[in-house]
Image (spheres, rainbow, N blue to C red):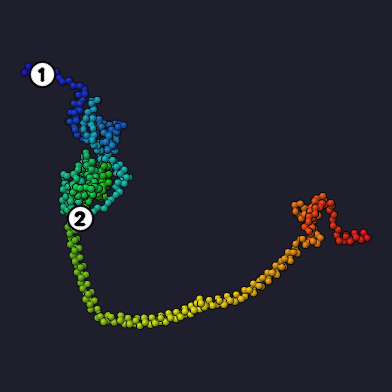
Amino acid sequence: MEKAKQNAEQQSPVVLSVAELAAAIRRTLEGQYAEVRVRGELTRIFTAQSGHLYGSLRDLSSSAAIDLVLWKAQARRFASLLSEGAQVEITGRVSAYAPQSRYQLVATHVALVGVGALLAELERLKSALAKEGLFDRKRPLPSFPRTVGIITSPDGAVIEDMLHRLAARFPVRVLLWPVLVQGAGAAEQIAQAVRGFSALKENAPKDTLSVPVPDLVVVARGGGSLEDLWAFNEESVVRAIAASAIPVVSAVGHETDTTLADYAADLRAPTPTAAAELLTPERAVLLASLDERQASLRRAWRRRWQTAQEDLRLGATRLASRERILESPRLALDERSGGLAREATRACKDAALRLDSVGRRLAVLAPAHRLDGWREQLEVRRVRLPQAMAEILTRQGTQLRTSLRLLESLDYHHILARGFALAQDDSGRVLRVAEDFSVGGEFRLTVSDSAEVRAETRGIEPRATEPQAKEQKRQKR
């Protein structure tokens, strides 16, 4: 025994480097705390340029804290919940940062805790999504759905109650899409289920599978606290419901519970069981209504048949014989035949009279008759033409001689022949009065034999008037 103890003391301990120790600690932490849920208050929150979010999660009742890391994808996903001082429940794993020998919580899911914080976030999300119009679309639901898609937990009383109620009222084909309805990952599974059912309808023409397409989709969950129902307030769930190609019914919680999924859905049911009643008619009521309508139809058909038989018998008694029926038409035919003959005779006479009148007018206007008149007129004009031409020539000759005599009388050469002369300057201008002459100026005189005499003005004396001329003659004597 002493010898074994001495051998153990002689063995040297294993020596580790700092990096090896840090790696061993990290493996131990990540193996022991691969998934944990931690509740606390967010502090020292900031976002790095890379998009990753860093901060601390502080204990609600002490000063204990743990470093917190959200990688970029999770930071974007839960950005609306990550504010300074928010009380949250973090789901993630514990890891160690070897360069500084610090352990930290790497978050994969974030959920608010505390009714006040949840209600504030609920109102903020409701207002933001309402402004986008995600709550406006309300489509009518089919009256007789053949296939219903249900999104809920496969365990629990919800699916059992709905299946039982559907089977009792109006059996339909049910497609169950099992999901988590509470806790981390629940919202993602619910949103994915809604999108999956919608993809079935959108890809139905190209889908070669035999999976039926639901006529409507029900998102269902039993009652619970605000924290329990929070997955149905997540933005991803609301957007998936609003974008669904299939009408969606929200049946979450009890009658007093309200989630954002209720606003985005085409119809809100107060409970999952009530959803089964709202979506399907009651088979017993339908059968009773069908029997009543069938009986009513038979009664109406019987009454119609009896009425038709009565009308037929009454018509048979009132139907007259063939001769009696044809009596009036025959009399009318005879009257109209006589009237037609008279009308035809009168029409023929009128046509003959009109034809005779037209013939007489045509005889008067015949070309041969009019040609004789034209010949007589032509002969008269042929006889009168030489006489008229002779008269015209005589009249024109007289006018010509008169014009010649007038022309001769107006010729200035006759005036020159009587001893007159025509005075003109070198430019050919006729000199008529004394003012046209200038002393010393030359001019031309044209005499009766058309000869021109060159002359010069020696002086200009005014012409004496007749009394003055007589006085001058008397003085000369």
x then y, percent, for residue 277: 20, 53
How many numbered marks have been drawn onto this rendered protein structure?
Answer: 2
Residue type of the residue flagged with mark 1: Ala
Residue nearest the observer in this picture, 41 or 55:
55
279 vs 225: above or below = below
x then y, percent, for residue 312: 22, 75
Which residue corresponds to the image point at 82% horizontal and 49% vertical from the top-left?
A: 440
Residue nearest the observer in this picture, 27 or 421:
421
Read off the residue under disc 2.
281
Image quarter where the N terminus lies is top left
Regarding residue 140, the answer to whether it shows in the image is yes
Q: Are marks 1 and 2 in contact (CB under 8 Å)?
A: no
Which residue corresponds to the image point at 78% horizontal and 59% vertical from the top-left?
A: 449
The answer to which quarter of the image holds residue 414 is bottom right
Which residue corresponds to the image point at 84% horizontal and 51% vertical from the top-left?
A: 458
Which residue corresponds to the image point at 89% horizontal and 61% vertical from the top-left?
A: 470
Task: Tell me the SS state at disc 1.
Answer: helix
Residue type of the residue flagged with mark 2: Pro
Read off the residue under disc 1.
8
Q: Is residue 351 left or right of residue 63?
A: right
Assess disc 2: are there few (<14), some (14-19) or many (≥20) residues with their C-alpha within 10 Å of its C-alpha: some
x then y, percent, for residue 319: 24, 78
Regarding residue 228, the answer to whether it shows in the image is no
242 vs 44: above or below = below
Q: Earlier in the sequence, mark 1 or mark 2?
A: 1
Q: Is residue 154 left or right of residue 339?
A: left
Residue found farthest to the left: 1
Image quarter where the C terminus lies is bottom right
